[in-house]
Amino acid sequence: MQLSAILIGAIVLFLVGLRLSAFFSGSETGFYRASFLRLSIEANTGDDVARRLLWFARNPSYFVATTLVGNNVSNYITTLAIGMFVVALFPANADWVEIVATLLCSPLIFFCAELLPKNLYYRAPLRFLRRDTSWLIFFYRLFLPVSLPLIGITKFIERVGGASQPRLELVLGRIRLAQVMRQGHSAGLLTASQGGLVHGLLHTAAEPVSGSMVPTVSIVGMPDNTSTAELLYFASSAGLSHIPLHRHDSPSTWYGYVRVVDLAIESRPLPEIIRTMRRIDATTSKLEVLRAFRAAENELCIVTADNKTVGIVAERILVEELFTPPRGTGILAPSQQEE
């Protein structure tokens, strides 16, 4: 009778460990697969389940720590159950029989506790996560005394390494947004140009503007005392739509530009149609520079480092880089860019 109770207890314990392992393994896959944009929308409509899941999305370290502890606990329970079963049946040869039994159970554990739940959560992440939210919160609270030190160590490493939680959320947000855009493109909802714009926003917009500027030694421009006819001839031969200008008595002092269309249709003197270029630090992101272009209604701006002019950047090139990967730093001359 006692032997039967031990065997039944071992089997029940094994099934509990198997179920817990499947729960934590599947939840981890579902968490990174779920659409948190959809969760955010549902949470804003008053959905309590979506609101709870969204909290984990905004605090991923708590979720990761909970699943990490849970996976270890479930693996320990499963191993303990195998050991109890073997010791009850083969007390004399428990050591090597336990090893053999563990090897024999490994395919079953892998299929039922890893492969199957991960595939299910991958295919329907929100459905399973919403169903298991109460259990997830229960285990989060249960494991909190153990998971808090892990979270503390993670935050300490982030502070030492200069990382931060908002940065982690930004990375996860970029990954999820990219997934949404890929799915939209596959479904025919997005065009290739829209996909290219998203790629540019995720991978190019945050880069410093210095990567897209023309260095001062390579600027194609003219002095500000040049005649209109000479400027038009120069623009035609160089293929320019905007001509940077420097002081006639200081070739290194770039300060403004003229549009070729203004030269062609305006009858005013050159000084009246010169547009002053805004000065922007070289470390400014490309997206911020684009916003500055639109706010000032300019097409060119001066890039500075330590209050010294280091180059010029054009709005057109920054816009192109949002749709296509950067092909170089040459700007202002379309013919040269194509070559």
Image (spheres, rainbow, N blue to C red):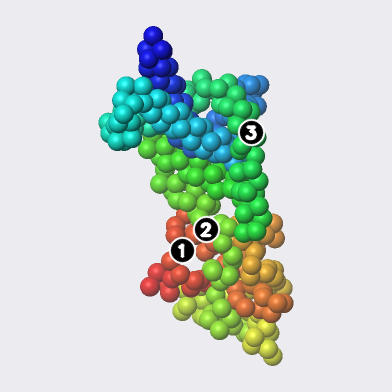
Q: Which residue is mark 1?
A: 326
Residue at 41% of width from left, 31% of height from top? Answer: 79
User: Where in the figure is residue 49, as x and y percent of width and height?
Assistant: 60, 22
Relative to the observer, which residue lies in front, 90 or 64? 90
Residue flagged by tag 1: what amino acid is it? Pro
> Disc 2 versus disc 1: distance between alpha carbons?
8 Å
Q: Are marks 2 and 1 in contact (CB under 8 Å)?
A: yes
Q: Secondary structure at mark 3?
A: helix
Q: Secondary structure at mark 2?
A: loop
- Return the disc, 2 or 1, that comes first in the chain's sequence: 2
Residue flagged by tag 2: what amino acid is it? Thr
The answer to whether residue 224 shows anywhere in this view is no
Dot 3 surroundings within 10 Å: few (below 14), some, or many (20 or more)?
A: some
Among the 4 quarters of the image, the one containing residue 160:
bottom right
Residue at 60% of width from left, 43% of height from top? Answer: 150
Q: Tell me the mark number nearer the camera, choosing from 2 and 3.
A: 3
Tell whether 252 sits left or right of 31: right
User: Where in the figure is residue 13, as x and y percent of width and height?
Assistant: 44, 21
Residue at 52% of width from left, 76% of height from top? Answer: 235
The answer to whether residue 73 shows anywhere in this view is yes
